[in-house]
Image (spheres, rainbow, N blue to C red):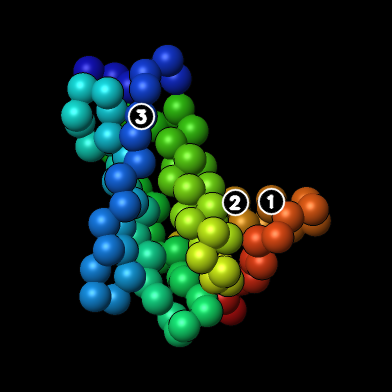
Amino acid sequence: MRGCAFMEYEIVFKKTDKGGVLDIITDDGIRAGYLSYSIVDSSTIDLEHTKVFPEFEGNGLGRRLVTAAMEYAERNGLETIASCSYAKHVLDEKKGIDTPIICKRLN
């Protein structure tokens, strides 16, 4: 089965001791990918890894995951940084847009 842009997807948050995972699930209950993040300190999360499984690539799911993580951070008053290169790319695109989300890169 190959994912497509017309499928419905749900993002499910799972917290862990050191951060959490956002899973993106198809309407058929199949895990299409995930984003893991860690809590850096009381005001910052680090988007560490974004993965979309090959059969679902090309449908914007990675961007959906990063955007969901950024929205989570914004709702919770957290700064978002990214050690994941793809998440850095999305965060860099958001710079310059009038948004309350604070974005910066790890060096």
Q: Amino acid at mark 2?
A: Val
Residue occupying the point 42% across, 15% down: 6
- Foreground mark, 3 or 2? 3
The amino acid type found where label 1 is placed reads Glu
Q: Can you identify the residue that label 2 sits on?
A: 90
Say which residue label 3 marks.
Answer: 9
Q: Nearer the viewer, mark 1 or mark 3?
A: 3
Q: Is residue 47 left or right of residue 1?
A: right
The 10 Å Cα crowd at callout 3, few under 14, some 14 to 19, many 20 or more, is: some
Name, please, the residue furthest toward the bottom: 41
Q: Is residue 38 above or below residue 98?
A: below
**CA–CA distance between discs 3 and 2?**
20 Å
- What's the amino acid at mark 3? Tyr
Image side of residue 14 versus residue 106, left or right: left
Tell me if mark 2 has few (under 14), some (14-19) or many (20+) residues whose alpha carbon lies within 10 angstroms of its own.
Answer: some
**Left or right of residue 2: residue 47:** right
Element type at mark 3 = strand
Work out whether residue 55 can be spotted.
no
Mark found first going from the N terminus, 1 or 3: 3
Q: Position of residue 18 (x, y in %)?
A: 29, 76
Where residue 23 sits in the image (x, y, percent)?
A: 29, 46
Q: Quadrant of residue 107?
A: bottom right
Q: Residue at x 27, y 63 (%)?
A: 15
- Badge 1 element: helix
- Residue identified by numbered label 1: 93
